[in-house]
Amino acid sequence: MELATYSMCARERRWAIAARQDRELLDQIAHVVEGPFHLISPTTFADNLVDFQRVLQERNVVGHVHFGKKANKAGAWLREVARLNGSVDVASAPEFVHSLANGIRGENIGVTGPAKSGELLWLACRHRSTVAIDALDELERVIALAEQAGPMRILLRVLPPQSPNSRFGFSPPDLLLALQRCEEVRQHVIMDGFAFHLDGYAVQPRAEFAAALIHQCLEARNRNFPCSIISIGGGFACSYVDEDDWRTFEAGMTPSQFHADKTFNFFYPYYQSPTGSTMLDAILKTRVGIGTLASTLIAADVYLNLEPGRALLDGAGMTVFPVQGFKRNAEHGMVTVAGLSMSLSEQWRGSEYLPTPILVQRGPARLQKPVRAAVGGSSCLETDIVTWRKIQFPAVPRYGDFLVYPNTAGYQMDKNESEFHQLALPPKIVVTQQDGRHNWKID
């Protein structure tokens, strides 16, 4: 098979396959929505969260799994977090309020991000949340607020040594100044520990940096800080396609596979290993000094926080675009769908969402003759391309069909959505099963 027509079939959960094959379900939603929509499965999200929590329990590590809320805006995830006594990571006042409104207690909300707004810090103080402090001036703002509103719990975010140009975290000199300042105002600021976030998806660097911060905690206790928490951030890998498909694509990728010979500087690694909770287990099993990270945490009596976003949403959502038309050129076709590529965010990061979309044929039977085509959005922008890659469809897509993009819940379906052309944002549809039938409601 030519690479230009090579299909990278997505790994799908059972609910997703059942939902996209339920024509009655899709027809009902389309009749109400009349545009693109997202299907989400809170049950799958809950399964992923439980898997992470189970790893901590099995390794006898005390800790909290914070759902990185920025990965998806739906409220349904938050209600599962509340039900399972999980936690949430937020970086804005609206995210904080949305979490409270969906049952998350303030002490289960972690606040991260740079240069936080005064409103966000005030909410965190009022609700006894823990705030990751990123800079000396932010620390001073927290101190001033705490002197008026009551003590605040904080973590000091540390600049990773392998990322000296990152704009996040305290450099070593500033970290010392921050610790000194916390010591001076210990009646107002409770220094609970340290935090970091690493780019990439490697296990070893996370374990090694976590071990270094455990040592920092032990040293900080000499200053009489509680210092019993480290947060290792997010970056837990996901695999969207099988390894053979991904390796074949990587080895043979050429511009000719894409509309207009489009080139890309990077792709998300759509196959990785280990992933999700298995990656957390690998981090905890990594040897750091005389023991594993898990045994080092236990011996030091240090709690472990983590902030997965994409990994908790893995397999928990899909995006459905109604087909509006199809046209041919000399070499390949172009499918136009209702909606915009802003609803599939990878394109707006200068990249491409590579798992192959699935054509759901509706209406009278048609000739099943394969056709290659890219997929465009319904705006008047030349760059509004949902899929640059030339996909081989089993038949010519036509008006009224659906294109289903699998596994889009993590950072894809709402990160860059826009009401360009005054088009409504695609709604999120919560899908559940009862007595063998699908139920649905708008989130």
Image: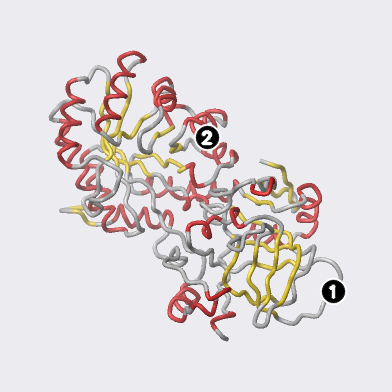
Q: Secondary structure at mark 1?
A: loop
The residue positioned 57% from the left and 69% from the top of the image is 388
Q: Secondary structure at mark 2?
A: helix
Indicate the position of residue 219 as horizontal and vertical percent values: 14, 36
Q: Quadrant of the C terminus?
A: top right
Residue assigned mark 2: 82
Q: Quadrant of the N terminus?
A: bottom right
Indicate the position of residue 44 as horizontal and vertical percent values: 57, 51
Residue at the extreme right of the image, as rendered: 364
Q: Nearer the viewer, residue 135 or 101?
A: 135
Indicate the position of residue 109 as horizontal and vertical percent values: 43, 32
Dot placed on the residue nearer the N-terminal end, 2 or 1? 2
Q: Nearer the viewer, residue 2 or 101?
A: 2
Checking the image for residue 365, the label placed there is 1
Q: Nearer the viewer, residue 134 or 194?
A: 134
Compared across the picture, whether 147 is left or right of 273 comes to left
The residue positioned 70% from the left and 42% from the top of the image is 442
Res 430 visible: no
Checking the image for residue 16, the label placed there is none
Res 143 visible: yes
For label 1, the crowd category at 10 Å Cα-Cα, with few meaning under 14, some 14 to 19 and many 20 or more, is few
- The image quarter containing residue 90 is top left
Compared across the picture, whether 372 is left or right of 352 comes to right
Amino acid type at circle 1 is Ala
| Figure label count | 2
Residue at the extreme bottom of the image, as rendered: 1
Tell me the CA gap for discs 2 and 1. 47 Å
Amino acid type at circle 2 is Ala
Compared across the picture, whether 104 is left or right of 304 comes to right
